[in-house]
Image (tube, rainbow, N blue to C red):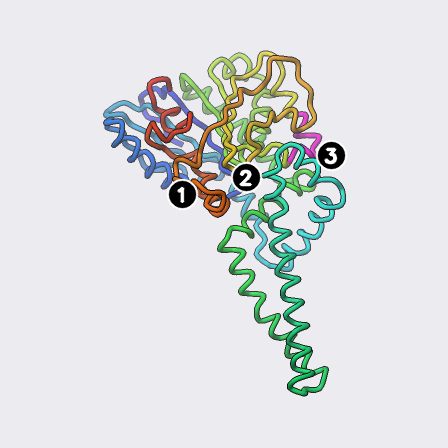
Amino acid sequence: MQHGAQAINRRVYFLSGFDPRGSSFYYRLFVEQLKTYAARSGRPLTVGRRRGQSDPLLSSWHVQDGPTTVLEVVFLHWDDIVRDHWPRNPLVIAAQGVRFALWYLLRGGLIRIARLCPSVALCGFYPLLFFGTFAVLLLLLALLVGTLLSGAVGLANPLAWGVSGLLVLALIPAVWRLADQQGVIWLFRSILFTHRLGQARDSALRPRLIELAERIVAIERDAPAARVELVGHSSGSFVMAMLAAELRRQPTFAADLAPRFSLLSLGQNFANLGVHKGAAAFHDDLRTLAAVPRLPWRDVTSRDDYLCFAGVDPYRSCGIALEPPAYPRLQLINLAQRQGLSSWWALITNQFPLHFQYLQTAAPQLQGGFDYFEHLLGADA
């Protein structure tokens, strides 16, 4: 990772959600949105090329305002871990799905999440409902076809039911493609990974976070930025909290980094992990973050976003009682207006694009109280 001769005024360490696309996708998204923001603001903002593609821990890019470097974005890699936990075999997903369904439907997962945020509970139930509905429909189709063939056509029963079974098997790939197109498979993979974390069955993420914490400390020692922010989007929000806790445990953090360090969570889903009894290490991370003096922490969510716990206190959602004042600072924004989503159906069918609106820019009248690029580069940045 290279640092120019100029001092960095602001450095943002960014953690994506459960997304296998990595830094190349987020770099392209950032460049596209910065062009829009620059055109609207009239500032000569440009983005440098992405550096560190071969670095297993981080990639980065600089933002220039004319000749001045005003921002460095550092993408923290855990996308390789995502790819390692991105099952492609439908049978593997089905087997993991059964395990999740037992916990969600029979062991209280659905009820606990519904008490906090019904829309998130609905999203957790949606893949099970989707596949369950199609399983029933395919079974009914098999019964109908088998009955018709054995009765009306007069085929021998074993042959009739064999034909109906083959017809159902031929339709399964079409159901899979539909689920993939609608984002159901992506959502289910994310749910299954979070469930795995919550059951303390993952051994890859925690060592990565320790590595990242040590790397951040080294960067800020050798090329310190005036201000440092750790940003987590979607599932990256609970990874952000875990990493921030690891940073606070570093011996030099309190003296060297804490005075210039802040946190930003966007579209967070802490409770998806925190409701699990096996998430004791994550609960300990949250308690570490709540220790006084607390780091400045802004949490931005939207009731339009059914993939996040909108306006839900992360500590309360995880069953952790804090002494006042409330922490973090919660902010609810309007996201639907950015895409002109005025009906319930439009909202439901655009959840994935809407969930990424946190990372995009919008005209002032459409920002709904928060704009990522204004936050990073605006007058108060």
Q: Label 2 vs label 3: CA separation? A: 22 Å
Which image quadrant: the C terminus?
A: top left
Q: Per the image, is 65 magenta?
A: no
Amino acid under disc 3: Lys
Residue depicted at 46% across the width and 23% down the height: 229
Question: Which numbered disc, 1 or 3, marks the residue closer to the eye?
Answer: 3
Mark 1 vs mark 3, CA separation in Å: 36 Å
**How many numbered marks have been drawn onto this rendered protein structure?**
3
Left or right: residue 193 compared with residue 64 = right
Q: Position of residue 75 (x, y in %)?
A: 45, 34
Left or right placement of residue 5 versus residue 177 in this view: left
Query: In which quadrant will I find the N terminus?
Result: top left
At x 40% / y 16%, what residue is drawn?
226
| Quadrant position of residue 179 | bottom right
In the displayed structure image, the side of residue 57 where residue 133 appears, left or right: right
Q: Residues within 10 Å of mark 2 (few under 14, many from 20)?
A: many
**Are the two marked residues, 2 and 3, in contact with CB atoms closer than 8 angstroms?**
no
Q: Judge whether residue 239 can be spotted in this image.
A: no
Kindly tell me whether residue 291 is visible in this rendering: yes
- N-term mark: 1 or 3: 1
Q: Secondary structure at mark 1?
A: helix
Task: Report the residue marked by disc 3.
Answer: 277
Residue 248 on image: x %, y %? 58, 20
Q: Quadrant of residue 268?
A: top right
Q: Nearer the viewer, mark 2 or mark 3?
A: 2
Q: Looking at the image, is mark 2 or mark 1 nearer the viewer? A: 2
Q: Which residues are magenta?
A: 273-284
